[in-house]
Amino acid sequence: QGAPPCRAGGGGVMLAAAFVWLLGFGATLAEPALATLATTVEKLTDRGLTQRQVVLSVAVGVGSGTALGLLKVVWEIPLMHLLLPGYALALALTIPSQEVYVCVAWDSAGVTTGPVTVPLVISLGLGLGKAVGVADGFG
C-alpha cells in the first residue's frame, strides 16, 4: 500500500502547502468583518495603516497559518512547537509597540474567524486528517 501521496516525499508536500496557503489567503480577503475592521483601523490611525495593509497582512498570516497546519499534520510536528514560538514572538512585539497597533494586531486574529475562512480551514483540516489517517487535523 505505501504511504499516502502527501507523505511520499518529493515536491507534493510543498505544492500542497502552497495551494493551502493560497486558499487561506484568498478566503481571508473575502471576509466581510476584516474589511470593516480595516476601514476602522485606517480612520483611527489617520492612514498610518491603510485598509489594504491591514487586509493583506492578516491574509498573509492566515495563509501561513493554514500552510503550517498542513505541514504539522503531514510531518507530525507537535502543536506546541508551532504555538509557543509564535506566541512568544507576538508577546515580544507587543511590549515595545504603540497601544493602537497592539489592539489592531490582536483583534485581527479574531476577525478572521468568519463565515468564509472557518468552513474552508475546517474542511481542509478534516480532509487532510482523513487522507493521512490522523485524528487531530490542524490543531
Image (cartoon, rainbow, N blue to C red):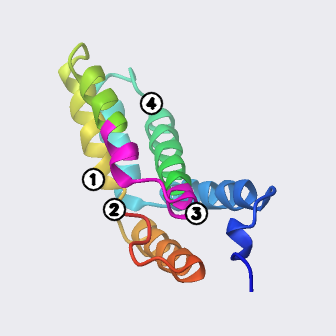
Q: Amino acid at mark 2?
A: Thr
Residue under numbered circle 3: 74
Q: Estimate the spatial distance between the alpha carbons at disc 2 and disc 3, rounded to whole Å.
A: 24 Å
Q: Residue at x 68, y 60 (%)?
A: 19
The answer to which quarter of the image holds residue 132 is: bottom right
Q: Amino acid at mark 3?
A: Val
Q: Residue at x 58, y 63 (%)?
A: 74
Q: Estimate the spatial distance between the alpha carbons at disc 3 and disc 4, rounded to whole Å.
A: 36 Å
Magenta residues (range): 70-84
Q: Nearer the viewer, mark 4 or mark 2?
A: 2
The answer to which quarter of the image holds residue 23 is: bottom right
User: Is there CB contact under 8 Å for labels 2 and 1?
Assistant: yes
Q: Residue at x 47, y 76 (%)?
A: 134
Q: Nearer the viewer, residue 20 or 139?
A: 139
Q: Nearer the viewer, mark 4 or mark 1?
A: 1
Q: Nearer the viewer, residue 135 or 18?
A: 135
Residue under numbered circle 1: 110
Q: Is residue 19 left or right of residue 59?
A: right
Q: Estimate the spatial distance between the alpha carbons at disc 3 and disc 1, rounded to whole Å.
A: 26 Å
Residue under numbered circle 2: 113
Q: Earlier in the sequence, mark 3 or mark 1?
A: 3
Q: Is residue 80 left or right of residue 72?
A: left
* Neighbours of disc 4 within 10 Å: few (<14), some (14-19), many (20+): some
Q: Earlier in the sequence, mark 4 or mark 1?
A: 4
For mark 4, give the secondary structure. Answer: loop
Q: Earlier in the sequence, mark 2 or mark 3?
A: 3
